[in-house]
Image (cartoon, grey):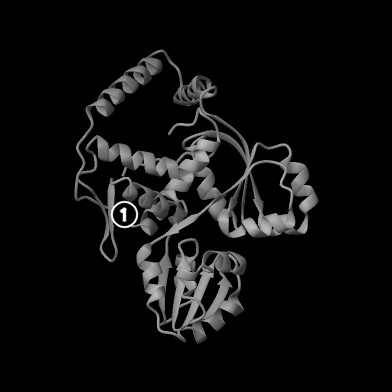
Amino acid sequence: MDIKIIQNFPIGIKEQVKRQIKTMIEDGRFKAGDMLLSAKDMGLFLSINRNTVASAYKELEQEKFLKVIKGSGTFVRNLTQKKSQGRLKEIFNLAYDQAIQLDFSAESITDYFITGLLEKSKDTRNGGKIILIDCNYEVLETLDEKIKARCDIDSHFMLIQDIEKFPGKFIKRAKEYDLIICGMNHMEELKIAVPDLPVETIGFMIKTDFQIMNQIMQLPAGTSAGYCCISKKSSKAFFKTTLFTSGSSLNRIHVGIDDIKGIGAMLKTCDIIFATNYVYDTLVENFPTKKKICQVDLDIDPGNLDFIISRLGKGAIL
């Protein structure tokens, strides 16, 4: 499989995987019905995190390039090849081959190509400086990649728990930025810690699989349900809505993947366990159990992302 990952590249690893698979589908190297490696096997093949591959697969599924069938695998959808893409590939290959013939190295061509794109787009894609806030870095990395795929930004990550401890430092830093984007589940905490936010602040929402939400709502009253994420705080944040908790009818335990004692108690006492895609593989592989563990796929709501991009400047690619 001709997929290459370049470390320290201007494009993130997940986006590299996604773009290369998308291109191979469009130019016919992957045919409709072809089965791709599992996220785990692809991760091992490319020496990257399987969650990164799973996230790329999920986005390609949303864009109708792939179809993920639980228990069967990930398959290429039927796609009509776009002639414009084929022509664009011819133009690129011609320019690249000419540069090689003139003794330019592949590295210098790549550097110039990336720099040239930035030079041509810097005036139209500038989204300013933003602070991204949530309770764990994994969510912030996902949001950051999605924004940077559509708009150039200078981003800084901050955890809500750190802001609660040191609000003064946050205020000082925030004054240097144009926009604050905070997880909706933490907006109240942010406003309590910093009542007078120095710059415009908007929230982002996490979207999940409706089938999982419906499954939780159907659990009988009194069911003991375990919820696991990166930390206990993020677990409570993701699973605190009425749709997830079914009100007060469930006995709930929230744990972080780093809390071995808490996970042990959860596995012992809970009838069913829900783990976010950030920790599901780790939980299954390191804590064998006969209890049913359901993976909860989390992603940024597309409509919410469009709104964020619209606030980052008229030059954003919509």
Near-viewer residue (228 or 112): 228
**The N terminus sits in image quarter:** top left
Q: Can you say whether 210 is above or below 13 in the image? A: below
Q: Position of residue 51 (x, y in %)?
A: 45, 56
Q: Position of residue 313 (x, y in %)?
A: 54, 31
Position above or below: 240 against 15? below
- Write down the quadrant of residue 93 in the picture: top left
Residue 136, placed above or below residue 99: below
Residue at 37% in and 70% down: 214
State whether residue 31 is above or below residue 189: above
- Which residue is labeled 1 in the image? 37
Crowd band around label 1 with a 10 angstrom C-alpha radius: few (<14), some (14–19), many (20+): some
Residue 92: quadrant of the picture:
top left
Image location of residue 311, percent across then percent down = 54, 37
Q: Residue furthest top?
A: 102
Nearest the camera: 238 or 259?
238
Residue 138 locus on image (x, y percent): 55, 55
- What residue type is disc 1 on? Leu
For the C terminus, the quadrant is top left
Residues 247 and 309: in front is: 247
Q: Residue at x 51, y 86 (%)?
A: 269
Secondary structure found at label 1 = loop
Residue found 67% across the figure and 59% down from its top: 189
Can residue 15 be seen in the rendering of this structure? yes
Q: At 74% from the left edge and 53% from the top edge, which residue is drawn?
A: 194
